[in-house]
Image (spheres, rainbow, N blue to C red):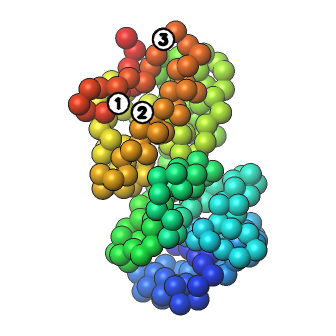
Amino acid sequence: MRILVVEDEKKVSTFIQRGLGEEGFSVDVAFDGEEGVDKAENQTFDLILMDIMLPKKDGLAAIKELRDKQIMTPVLCLTARDSVDDKVTGLDIGADDYLAKPFAFAELVARCRALIRRGSKDRGAEIFFADLRLDPVAHKVWRSGNEIDLTSKEYALMEYFMRHPNQPLTRAMIAENVWDYTFDSFTNIIDVYVNYLRNKIDRDYDKKLIHTVRGQGYMLKEL
């Protein structure tokens, strides 16, 4: 498995490269955002580890450029920024996960494996629920025949709902399955993204499909 590490601090990048190498990964390094985008465009990687504070082009701009170019390689953000707003911004532009510095190396390895495993899964056939249709190959969602414009993380959340209809999904379950997070401090972002999704999926329709289950979490169901 090939991983691209985009990190301008050479001690940090060397540490990550050596550690992941010992875990059996093949690791390339870029030291600024422009170099990172160039390598991601011209080479094939299974995962990108992207620092946010980078010279020439910051990590968020680099991720946005990759997504605009339809390069959908999973991206794990590595950064000292740890506020909810910063996490939401990174995830909203197309990052798949977020790990704040300093981090435990074992957690980094686990996150890498989870993202690579998720990215390699065969998503299978289209999924239908009520008047929703989801195409796992094209990463697109329609309601009543109208395409819904979703960010990558909104899409992942929608897919999780549609693969588990009529089931109460706790915030912890959503965090673990959509973001691979297991700690409670992350779950407020779940509420933010469920609201984003409701605004796009339910707002213009009389029949609401995403419901709050008091004391539990959320459920995709028809009333």
Q: Which mark is residue 69?
A: none
In percent of width and height, residue 24 lies at: 44, 81
Using the image, determine if residue 99 lies above or below residue 223.
below
Asked whether the residues under the numbered discs 2 and 1 touch, taking CB atoms below 8 Å apart as contact, a structural biologist would say yes
Q: CA distance from mark 3 to mark 2?
A: 16 Å
Task: Name the N-terminal-most of marks 1 and 3.
Answer: 3
- For badge 3, the amino acid type reads Lys
Label 3 secondary element: loop
Residue indicated by mark 1: 218
Using the image, determine if residue 136 lies above or below residue 16.
above
67 on left or right of 14: right
Residue indicated by mark 3: 207
Using the image, determine if residue 20 lies above or below residue 145.
below
Residue 126 visible here: no
In percent of width and height, residue 1 lies at: 52, 72
Task: Name the N-terminal-most of marks 2 and 1.
Answer: 2
Task: Name the N-terminal-most of marks 3 and 2.
Answer: 2
Quadrant placement of the C terminus: top left
Give the camera-side residue of 72 and 10: 10
25 on left or right of 217: right
Q: CA distance from mark 1 to mark 3?
A: 16 Å
The residue that appears at 67% across and 81% down in the rendered structure is: 31
The residue that appears at 30% across and 46% down in the rendered structure is: 172
Q: Which mark is residue 161?
A: 2
Using the image, determine if residue 83 lies above or below residue 155.
below
- For badge 2, the amino acid type reads Phe
